[in-house]
Amino acid sequence: MHIEPLGRYMFFPLWLGYIFFMDALVFSRHGTSLLRRMRWRYPFLFLVSSLFWWFFEGMNNAVQNWHYVLDQAYNPLVYVLLASISFSTVLPAVLETTEFFCTFLCWQPRLLAHDAGPRLPVPMLVGLELIGLACFILPLAFPGYCFALIWLSLIFMLDPINNFMGRKSTLAHIAVGDWRFFVLPLGGLTCGFFWEMWNYFSLPKWYYTVPYIGFWKIFEMPLLGYVGYLPFSLELFALYQCVLWMIARKRDFLVI
């Protein structure tokens, strides 16, 4: 990707191609796909994804776990625009990859696509919500020790809300013993591998300074750092479900 002058702008086209390729694979195996079901609503995933990742950029200001190497100085407005375009591919990439894995019977979750599963007791949901708030606050207060909690915060903050409002949630799948729902982390880990591989040969690029685990790197990412992609994918799913609830959308476009 480090081919001037186009290399600096190739992140989005590369991932857009990946997203459409995965969507085509899903369609070829399943006869339908996320793009085909969402149609004109599909670009909305990109907008939500971009806004979502800026949350983690804000958290990273405290924990300082990743840093960017730029090929040139960018005007702040141009930087925000280019970064937002790149961030926009995160959510659709993970959802499309997960749907592809779900075309294999062994990975299909037991709960049907439109089955939200059981609602958990309210006291349990409140307790999990408090855990989420703690996972949000502690990295800001003690970044050197609690940095990893940023990858759990939104699961515990959004997933209980989704469950309470009757949306699909990780909690409901766990409650019925539907461990095949963890096809989502598999999708996140797959995307994580490609993110790190393509980033390694790119410019602009990112690198990591992660306390305690910054060894045995695969590309720029420490080996243990790939574990973060597992809960991250669940956060993406929780965000997607929460947004559907906020816009009063009853139909779930995902076949997960």
Image (cartoon, rainbow, N blue to C red):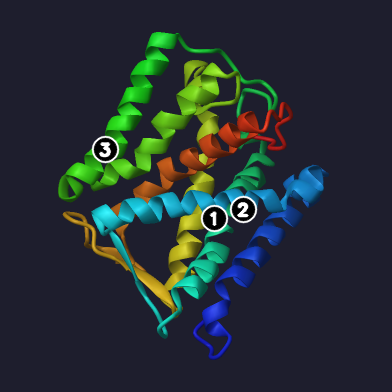
- Compared with 223, 202 (above or below) is below
Q: Give the mark nearest the N terminus, 3 or 2.
A: 2
Q: Mark 1 points at which residue?
A: 50
Disc 1 is placed on an element classified as: helix
* Disc 1 and disc 2 in contact, CB within 8 angstroms: yes
Name the mark on residue 47. Answer: 2
Disc 3 is placed on an element classified as: helix
**For residue 169, what is the image quadrant?**
top right
User: What amino acid is found at the position of numbered circle 1 in the picture?
Assistant: Ser
Identified at 45% across, 71% down, the residue is 199
> Observer-nearest residue: 170 or 57?
57
Name the mark on residue 137. Answer: 3
- Compared with 220, 70 (above or below) is below
Place of residue 96 in the rendered image (x, y in percent of width and height, measured from the top left): 64, 49
- Compared with 54, 105 (above or below) is above
User: What amino acid is found at the position of numbered circle 3 in the picture?
Assistant: Ile
Gap in angstroms between the C-alphas marked 1 and 2:
5 Å
User: What amino acid is found at the position of numbered circle 2 in the picture?
Assistant: Leu
